[in-house]
Amino acid sequence: MTRIKVCGVTLPDDAARVAAAGADFIGFNFWPKSKRYVTPERAPMLSGVARSAGTAKHVGVFVDPEVDEVLAITALIDLDIIQLHGDEDPDLVKRISLAVYRPVWKAIPVASRRDIEHLDVWPVEAILLDAPTPGRGGAGAKFDWALAREARQRYPKLDIVLAGGLNPGNVATAIQTVEPWAVDVASGVEAGPGIKDAAKLEAFFSAARGAR
């Protein structure tokens, strides 16, 4: 069964709505350049609201962080998973994982078949495949799902998270095409950056669940 992650949550009402809808994962973005940036001081409040409304695991999204930065934020907010969305190398990924004692996901921008080679070198629990964008995801851009399906088939032991341009209208087809371990949506369920749309969320969950 394909899991659902809603990323880029910035508002308490949205945190509650996403968790109550039964999301498997809820993402908080700690990259200051993101349109969906959440300050470390505000994140515990959002996390608390989400935890009171559902059982979603909380994912902290970072871009090229220092180990100390991740440690400082995990001291403030009880994150379940660390998602690295920058140009981190396997060594840094391993050091972060060992430092915070939490599972790590690594985001890989996919533009060609070359980008899905050697995915098994990453010391992570999941690989998130996304479209390459300057904003490190969340732009509503889609990539070739055939490459994601190929990655899933080439690395059957890896949990593949599909991101990039997903929305209520295409998530069912994406799941049927790729058969990913999880799907990740941000802009596809928004009224504006960081502001989720209740109707789009409901439609996304309905379509994703119908396909899995």
Image (cartoon, rainbow, N blue to C red):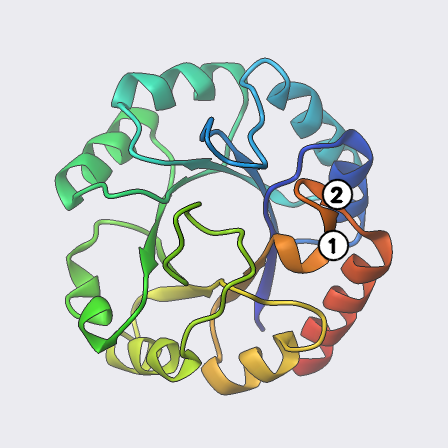
Q: In terms of depth relative to the viewer, which is nearer, 43 or 74? A: 43
Q: Residue at x 58, y 63 (%)?
A: 3
- Residue at figure coordinates x 60%, y 84% from the top left: 173
Q: Where does label 2 land, which residue?
A: 54
**Which badge, 1 or 2, is on the more N-terminal residue?**
1
Pick whichever, 192 or 67, lies toward us. Answer: 192
- Image x and y of residue 127, in percent: 34, 58
- Residue 62 sits above or below residue 70 on the image: below
Which three-letter amino acid code belongs to the residue tagged 2?
Answer: Gly
The quadrant where residue 131 appears: bottom left
Residue 168: percent from left, percent from top: 72, 70
Residue marked by disc 1: 22
Q: Is residue 141 left or right of residue 87?
A: right
Determine whether the residue tagged by mark 2 lies in a helix, strand or loop.
Answer: loop
Q: Amino acid at mark 1?
A: Gly
**In the figure, is residue 207 to the left or right of 60?**
right
Q: Marks 1 and 2: CB-CB under 8 Å? A: yes
Q: Spatial distance from mark 1 to mark 2, Cα to Cα?
A: 7 Å
Position of residue 93 measured from the top left corner of the image (x, y, whole percent): 23, 39
Looking at this view, is 82 or 102 the one in front?
A: 82
> Is 127 displayed left or right of 44 in the figure?
left
Q: Secondary structure at mark 1?
A: loop
Drawn side of residue 75 relative to residue 153, left or right? right
Tell me the quarter of the picture where residue 166 sits.
bottom right
The picture quadrant where one finds residue 119 is bottom left
Q: Quadrant of the N terminus?
A: bottom right
